[in-house]
Amino acid sequence: MHVTFDHSRPETDNITTYFFEPEKPVDYVAGQFIELYIPHDNPDDRGIKRWFTLSSAPSDKLLSITTKHAKRSSTFKQALAALEPGTRLKMAEPMGDFVLPRDASRPLVFIAGGIGVTPFHSMLQQLAADKEHRQIRMLYGVPTENEIIFQDTFDAANQHVTVMVENPSPEWGGERGTITVDEIIGLEEPSDDSLIYVSGPEPMVESLTKQLIARGFGQQQVVSDYFPNYPTI
Ligand SMILES: Cc1cc2nc3c(=O)[nH]c(=O)nc-3n(C[C@H](O)[C@H](O)[C@H](O)COP(=O)(O)OP(=O)(O)OC[C@H]3O[C@@H](n4cnc5c(N)ncnc54)[C@H](O)[C@@H]3O)c2cc1C
């Protein structure tokens, strides 16, 4: 399919949401991802396409992705940041099974590492739009308080989020440190029938998924979404 870049919205100094208008309505489920192509001059070895979770909800008119810009960005991210409104781009149809379970009674635990918060943003927005309530506990790890995004969506969805900051300022009054399995169990108290969704940088998701399973949670209970090329949150 093709989409037209509409506008961008800075979330923080280094995180931006990009909005696209699809050429025809797109059928997708909150939590799914797309592949975006941005042809540009002299691409680096990472190339001209990337996967991104749709941070928008299916009820939104525009599609959006939200991404973090590194100090030394890939040529793809530089081309993304330089997009002019009206630019037409190729985007693969949404795909993936990092989506809410059909059984609405299932308790859910969302674990977001940094920009891995994007699928949860889509899900919480959609639940709010549908006026649907699910039992959700959420733990969100960020490098500093400045990288907390989507607080408005959490508030609108009436969703309490435990934020854990790796390198907090002295004023930070919340949880401090890196998300570990002990924090997930201690703070979010998953039950035997909880589904635990983990999303974020590949090394973090891989490690937490393995540890959760080693601590007795079933393979089917842990649902993982891996973002490559981010070494840390
Ligand atoms: C299913 C799925 C969903 C995803 N959803 C999202 C999402 O919602 N949001 C999101 O941001 N990402 C998402 N990703 C990850 C995304 O596809 C990219 O891998 C990620 O954003 C990193 O982008 P980048 O390679 O352009 O690197 P950058 O973001 O530019 O940089 C990341 C790191 O790599 C370094 N770096 C940059 N270029 C190079 C290079 N050429 N050589 C060596 N090091 C380099 C940077 O200095 C930085 O440390 C998702 C991936 C998958 C598979």
Image: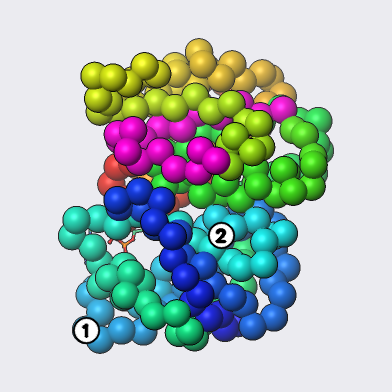
Label 2 element class: loop
Taking the spot 44% from the left edge, 16% from the top edge, the residue there is 182
Q: Is residue 189 at all visible to an observer of this figure?
A: yes
Residue 128 located within the stretch drawn in magenta: no
Picture disc at residue 181: none
Q: Find the residue positioned furthest to the top.
A: 186
Q: Amino acid at mark 1?
A: Asn
User: Which image quarter is the N terminus in?
Assistant: bottom right
Residue located beneath label 1 in the image: 42
Residue located beneath label 2 in the image: 54
CA–CA distance in space, label 2 to label 1: 27 Å
Q: Quadrant of ligand 1?
A: bottom left
Query: Seen in the image, is 62 located left or right of residue 213?
Result: right
Viewer-closest of 159 and 191? 159
- Label 2 CB less than 8 angstroms from ligand 1: yes
Residue 37 location, x and y as percent?
44, 78
In the rendered image of this protein, does residue 117 appear above or below residue 140? Answer: below
Taking the spot 39% from the left edge, 56% from the top edge, the residue there is 10
Residue extent of the magenta highlight: 135-152
